[in-house]
Image (spheres, rainbow, N blue to C red):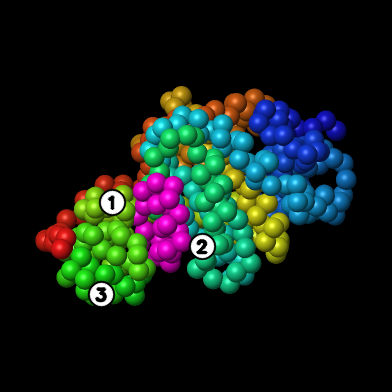
Amino acid sequence: MTSPQLHVQLRTQLSQWVTPKDQRHLSGCAESVAAILQSQSGCLSHWLPFLSHRNCNARDHLERLSYFVHNDATTAETFYDPLMRHCLQAFEGEAVVLTLDTSMLWDQFCLIQICLAWGGRSLTLAGEVIEHGSATVGFKDYRPLLERAKALLPPECKVTFLADRGFEHGELIRWLQHHQWSWAIRAKSDLLITLANGRTRAVRDLLPPMNQANLFHNVTILEDIHCHLATARTDAAADDWAVLSQQPTSLQTFTEYGQRFGGIEPHFKDYKSAAFEVVRSRLRDAKALTCLFMLLDIAYLFAWMLGLSVVLQGQRLRLDWHSRRGLSFLQLGLRELATLCYKGLTLPWLQPLPYKSPPPASASKHKCLIQDIMLSFSKVTLVSA
């Protein structure tokens, strides 16, 4: 049986940027990505109906796929990074927002990712799965990902780096300062803050009364790191807020940090339940899982860009019934891909990502209201000395 059209098209496109050690690896990557896109699953056994052109039994398929994801030559540096460099061309000299976060798999493995926040969602720059029983990881676990992400960005990018509680690591902040990246990191309540007047307090002791905000300039953390702190409490949020920043804090600090929520958390949900059902994967090996997520990211990238092209061409309403965009670019892309396969049409060529970010999707009026909500505080106190 001849190779399916989608597999051939993906292999042709990947060959423009990817230079593997063995051309069979390129074919295996294209087959896997095509199967992921059509099955919408991260479970290897779900790919089998889309590999029938090989005319072999299911066990042989699974053994070959297992060999591929365990192969030391199947790395993101070879297969994924060249695609991202192609897609990020328009960001040279521009401002970008990167996010760092972790997600647990079966309480046994921890997925660590650094992503680009764009269009209300995230695109993976660098990721790795480690065998680790907690979502809290050390700097040594993700420093290689920082280096990879930095290497992928075009020259002269102005980076703002966002991270959640648990990442207020001195080594991380010193790394960010060394590379001249701006940053905003949410602080744990027990982190000790030395104020400009020399007094040391825990973050929990610097929280304001309800519906108020405190801005602390020129504080010191972790003995020798000088930065700024913004704290707030509001009825509109379940948690209290404490954000450390390299820049002098203002109410805009909370808006800047809020870009993290619309991006990386839905991204993890796409992996687990909204798109690819990776939790159904039977892989229980950190290296194989890292490879699987790399393949998912390649599929994610092709579907994302296909969905974006549907919107840019004014064709969204063919696939999305909402008055304003209610489907993510990923979901639009997966639906458009199904249309292309059904009609036997050609997959569009992977294009660079435009720098200008569109507004995020809103699947309901309630989500629209949440996105458009304006927080107000009865009192804002600035403490600079």
Where does residue 320 sit, x and y in percent of width and height? 45, 37
Q: Is residue 378 visible?
A: yes
Residue 247's label in the rendered image is 1
* Comes first in the chain, label 3 or label 2: 2
Query: Which residue appears at 54% of the width and 49% of the height?
Result: 147
- Magenta stretch in the rendered image: 164-186
Work out whether residue 332 or residue 301 is closer to the camera in this orientation and state it: 301
Residue 152, image quadrant? top right
Where does residue 130 sit, x and y in percent of width and height? 62, 63
Task: Please give the residue where the numbered disc 3 appears in the rendered image.
Answer: 201
Q: Are marks 3 and 2 in contact (CB under 8 Å)?
A: no
* Comes first in the chain, label 1 or label 3: 3
Task: Please give the residue where the numbered disc 2 appears in the rendered image.
Answer: 139
Query: Which residue appears at 49% of the width and 35% of the height?
Result: 154
Left or right placement of residue 97 versus residue 248 in this view = right
- In the image, what residue type sits under mark 2? Phe
Cα distance between the residues tagged 1 and 3: 21 Å
